[in-house]
Image (cartoon, helix red, strand yellow):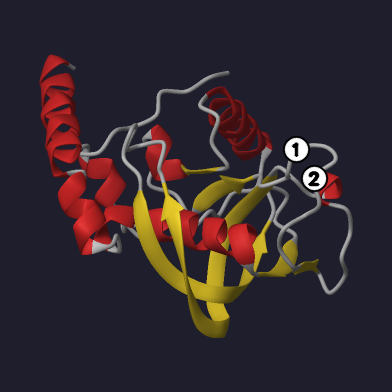
């Protein structure tokens, strides 16, 4: 089922998610709906706050198009299985640490900020300890787009947004669009 994606200006986007404590059919269905919603919106990640739930749950899928080499390094539970074996990946209760603190600049977007893109500096390599929707523990280490996507989504789970880290010049260029989104969200919330 396709869910509504919350837009900038809706307070839920600034809420810190509660830990996932029940690993049941309801959680699995929510994760599946989030995957469908992410694909429908042509995204590569989606956090629970973006579908109106303050939970420590996000979805990530950064598989490159068929025939394109994987442009990042990763290990999943100490191995390097094909991405198709674990993506789309549901991440519950993530604990992130930086394993390579060199910095990388990349232009990011966000499904809660349609039409807004800007350069964001992030560490190159991350380690993420998490649980899947069955509650099983996993560890993923990644750099490149996968590492960046995990950091972007985990920020959402902690009430942080990519505009908080965006290059000041890019933020200034997007100021009008961001204000318009906030106005539209305010109008939407009043109509509910």
Question: At numbered mark 2, what does the secondary structure look like: helix, strand or loop?
Answer: loop
Closer to the camera, 148 or 94? 148
Image quarter (top left, top right, bottom left or bottom right) of the C terminus: top left
Residue 30 location in percent, x, y?
57, 33
Horizontal and vertical percent for residue 11? 21, 42
* Above-or-below relation of 8 to 73: above
Q: Which residue in the protein does label 2 denote?
A: 68
Q: Which residue is mark 1?
A: 65
**Tags 1 and 2 touching, CB below 8 Å:** yes
**Viewer-nearest residue: 152 or 13:** 152
Q: Quadrant of residue 94?
A: bottom right
Q: Would residue 132 be visible to someone looking at this image?
A: yes
Q: Residue at x 31, y 40 (%)?
A: 116
Residue at left offset 41%, top offset 44%: 109
Q: How far apart are the alpha carbons under marks 1 and 2?
A: 6 Å
Q: Secondary structure at mark 1?
A: loop
Residue 35 location in percent, x, y?
61, 33
* Image point (66%, 37%), residue name: 28
Q: Nearer the viewer, residue 122 or 49?
A: 122
Q: Quadrant of residue 9?
A: top left
Q: Which mark is residue 179?
A: none
Q: Nearer the viewer, residue 34 or 19?
A: 34
Q: Quadrant of residue 79?
A: bottom right
Examine the rendered structure and indicate whether residue 147 appears above or below residue 24. below
């Amino acid at each position: 089922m396709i869910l509504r994606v919350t837009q900038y200006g809706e307070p839920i986007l600034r809420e810190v998610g509660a830990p996932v404590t029940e690993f049941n059919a309801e959680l699995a269905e929510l994760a599946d709906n989030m995957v469908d919603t992410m694909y429908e919106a042509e995204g590569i990640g989606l956090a629970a706050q973006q579908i109106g739930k303050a939970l420590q749950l996000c979805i990530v899928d950064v598989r490159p198009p068929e025939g394109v080499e994987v442009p990042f390094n990763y290990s999943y539970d100490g191995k390097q299985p094909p991405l198709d074996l674990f993506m789309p990946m549901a991440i519950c209760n993530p604990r992130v640490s930086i394993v390579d603190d060199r910095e990388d600049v990349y232009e990011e977007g966000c499904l809660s900020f349609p039409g807004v893109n800007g350069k964001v500096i992030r560490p190159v390599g991350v380690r993420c300890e998490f649980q899947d929707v069955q509650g099983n523990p996993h560890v993923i280490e990644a750099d490149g787009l996968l590492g960046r996507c995990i950091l972007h989504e985990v920020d959402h789970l902690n009430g942080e947004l990519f505009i908080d880290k965006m290059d000041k010049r890019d933020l200034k260029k997007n100021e009008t669009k961001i204000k318009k989104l906030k106005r539209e969200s305010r109008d939407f919330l009043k109509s509910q």
